[in-house]
Image (tube, rainbow, N blue to C red):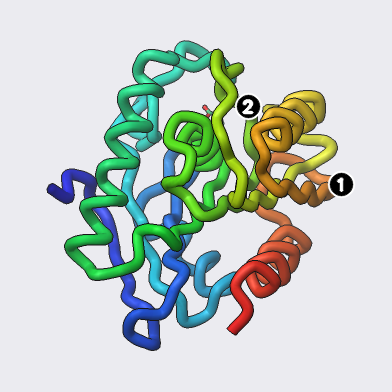
């Protein structure tokens, strides 16, 4: 059941993979990251859901108690729900569920990180832009075979660099191949991150 508002853009070549799962930041929607997807993976298929939690009118993917303080019970439930949506969408639209790469910004990156930790193997890879470590996992997931690109800003007022380092460390300890791209700036998608994501995706999925 496709129980998220979403957009699905089929790939230019029917059956082509990967499919990018586009996850917007707080206050975004299902339209937000389509242009970013088209820049970093021209011609790919895109699945772009809108977060179901609404905070003062701003859609998000899970509840928070304060800036950077997450409602972890809600995050667990929403992560499972989003994972089930991706699987159902693969059946509905006929894309390869084993070749889905999440591309998330901020709150979208945080739920993508939670998907990696809670549902290892669901994502083939992830581009996490301005992410945090959403929680310290109790058990180490097995992320062998999963590739992750982290894009982060050294002067991000929301995410301290130590959070980014810890996220990379947790993912690496779980067996993921992690690349970290630093920008000098803040909580935004910088041109350098777009270029880094384009190159990273090309090397991951050569045509
Ligand atoms: C979050 O709530 O996921 C992070 O603090 C980023 C944000 O959305 O502001």
Q: Residue at x 63, y 79 (%)?
A: 206
Up/down of 207 relative to 179, above or below: below
* Relative side of 91 to 47, left or right: left
- SS at circle 1: loop
Up/down of 11 relative to 196, above or below: below
**Of the residues under marks 2 and 1, which one precedes in the sequence?**
2
- SS at circle 2: loop
Q: How many marks?
A: 2
Considering depth in this image, is 99 or 9 the residue closer to the camera? 99
Q: Residue at x 32, y 40 (%)?
A: 82
Q: In which quadrant is the C terminus drawn?
A: bottom right
* Relative side of 79 to 137, left or right: left
Q: Residue at x 37, y 32 (%)?
A: 79
Considering depth in this image, is 120 or 186 the residue closer to the camera? 120
Q: Can residue 67 be seen in this snapshot?
A: no
The location of residue 204, given as percent across then percent down, is 64, 67
Residue bearing mark 2: 133
Tell me the quadrant of ligand 1.
top right
Mark 2 and mark 1: Cα distance apart in space: 20 Å
Residue bearing mark 1: 184
Q: Nearer the viewer, mark 2 or mark 1?
A: 2
The location of residue 83, given as percent across then percent down, is 33, 41
């Amino acid at each position: 059941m496709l129980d998220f508002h979403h957009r699905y853009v089929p790939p230019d070549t029917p059956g082509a993979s990967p499919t990018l799962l586009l996850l917007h930041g707080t206050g975004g929607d299902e339209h937000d990251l389509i242009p970013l997807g088209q820049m970093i993976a021209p011609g790919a298929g895109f699945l772009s859901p809108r977060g179901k939690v609404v905070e003062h009118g701003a859609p998000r993917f899970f509840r928070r108690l304060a800036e950077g303080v997450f409602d972890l019970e809600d995050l667990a439930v929403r992560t499972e729900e989003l994972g089930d949506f991706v699987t159902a969408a693969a059946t509905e639209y006929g894309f390869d569920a084993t070749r889905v790469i999440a591309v998330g910004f901020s709150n979208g990156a945080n739920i993508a990180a939670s998907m990696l930790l809670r549902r290892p193997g669901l994502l083939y890879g992830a581009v996490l832009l301005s992410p945090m470590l959403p929680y310290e996992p109790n058990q180490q997931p097995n992320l062998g075979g999963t590739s992750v690109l982290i894009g982060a800003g050294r002067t991000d007022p929301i995410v301290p660099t130590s959070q980014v380092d810890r996220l990379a460390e947790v993912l690496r300890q779980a067996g993921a191949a992690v690349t970290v791209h630093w920008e000098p700036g803040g909580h935004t998608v910088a041109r350098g991150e777009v270029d880094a994501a384009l190159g990273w995706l090309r090397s991951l999925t050569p045509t």
